[in-house]
Image (cartoon, rainbow, N blue to C red):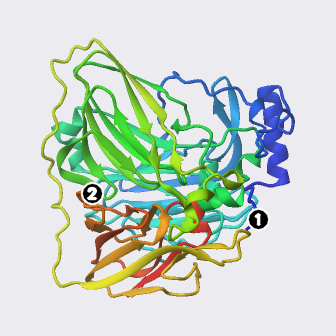
Amino acid sequence: MPRVAVTSRRDFLRVSAVGVIGLGVASAAGCSDGRGGSSDAVPDGGPGRPFMQPTVLASSGGTLDVTLTAAAALVPWGSGRRWALTYNGTAPGPTLQVRPGDRVRLTLVNDLDDPTNLHTHGLHVSPNGASDNVFVMVGPGERHTYEYEIPADHRSGTFWYHPHHHELVAPQVHGGLAGAIVVRDAVDDEPALRGATERVIVISDPRVGSDAGILDVSHMEQMQGREGDVVTVNGRRNPVIATTAGSTEHWRILNASPSRYHRLHLDGPAMYLVATDGGRLARAERADDVLLAPGERVELLVPIDRVGRSAFTSRAYDRGTPGMGGGMGGGMGGMGGGSGSSTDAAPLLTLEAGEGTGTDAVRPGSLSVAPPPAISDGTSERDVVLSMGMGGGMGSGMSFEIDGSTFDPTRTDIEARLGTVETWRISNTSTMDHPFHLHVWPFAVLAASDGARPAPGWKDTVNVPAGGWVRVQVHFTDLAGRAVYHCHILDHEDLGMMGVIDVR
């Protein structure tokens, strides 16, 4: 499969001209990093800068009317700038804040020279027409207006939006096209949350350079799943959150990396899990490490009970290497510039707590939310198999498949009946972890092959370990339509690990 650079000569010249003014260097000049990104021309992103959140676009009077323009731009990077794909000039894009029952009218303007579209990841909204329809294509220079009806009983929580045009998803998201969606309701006014300082934390791992060459990857990097040069929080490297002892932090955390797993750990203060993908839990749970696969979200409460500095880090996680049944996996991880078998540890942010006036941090307890997923007995059973095989037209001869097939938008792979509940056994026969994502319809995790306790609450993305399986229960209680399910290592999705589901 050819390498993809999501830009055009027109965009390249326009952005490069800005770079000449802003950086004092031509973007085509300087020492190449071997991937076409000219990284040496871009000043270091420098850790230690203040934490900054994305702009918030909030609904009012039950409606949110917003325009998002997808375009290449140079964004702030330390004392200079770096090349990125942006929504409204920023990477990540603005946070969309809505309430249950709201109507959202979102106009996507495509100022790229490649097709794009938009997926509202995790929102329980219709997949049809002008709603969360990933089969819509917005061509270069075109615009498309999406209209979403947020159900009146939609769970509060943290969701997100990103492109979903097949074969271009990984480069567009890795370039920076992503943003958070926050659904707020009465739960956000309860004492455990109302008294906390709320922050949106979008984790990504861009490649740093001054032109579109940063999006070029090798065949092996696509098979492994691309990872970047640095890990950033809201576009900054290891920013500093200034807080005070006696306060409480409420972090809405999104893993917007296209392939990198983040095993979250905080030195010092305790972390309490209060929400996963699909919304709030009934009770806060103490968490030491939290693994976030690509696409997953969590919400954490952090009571600041001491003065001093604490490091919030992404610990190393081995997600495997490309291979089939173990026969090829052992030696392929370092070929062709691949990312290797293990995601490196990286700092995320630093928490600096000074003396405060509060007497004690808020201690999280129970939350008045909808009950956890009810597990149904006697449901219909379905097997879904994630695999890597030979074929598929790639230069390497390897394909990425679900149930033995690569993605075909004209084919329906699963038919389900509206108003039913199904139990799926999702197996992974490959030598790599694959995070499985189902659009529109939430599920509960029942069990996993490693015997670990299932993730609490409603989910839309779950990690399926190499050679293992998970069992989930999918509730097709409402919202008929045609959507997709896929691996959320986005290069794997682009290479064919995706299927079509039709609920009638």
Per the image, the residue denoted by label 2 is 455
Numbered circle sitting on residue 411: none
Q: Quick one: 133 or 62, which is closer to the camera? A: 133
Per the image, the residue denoted by label 1 is 2
Q: Please name the amino acid that badge 2 sits on.
A: Ala
Q: Quick one: 456 or 391, which is closer to the camera? A: 391
**Residue at (18% x, 30% y) in the render:** 362
Measured in 3D between alpha carbons, the distance from the residue under mark 2 to the one under mark 1, in whole angstroms, is: 38 Å
The image shows residue 397, relative to residue 223, as above or below, that is below
Quarter holding the C terminus? bottom left
Label 1 neighbour load within 10 Å: few <14, some 14-19, many 20+: few
Q: Name which quarter of the figure residue 269 lies in.
A: top left
**Residue at (27% x, 59% y) in the render:** 155
Total labels: the figure holds 2
Left or right of residue 270: residue 486 = right
**Residue at (71% x, 42% y) in the render:** 73
The image shows residue 24, relative to residue 368, as above or below, that is above
Q: Please name the amino acid that badge 1 sits on.
A: Pro
> Where does the image place residue 132, in percent across and percent down from the top left?
48, 69
**Residue at (46% x, 33% y) in the render:** 348
> Where does the image place residue 503, in percent across and percent down from the top left?
39, 84
The image shows residue 139, relative to residue 30, as above or below, that is below
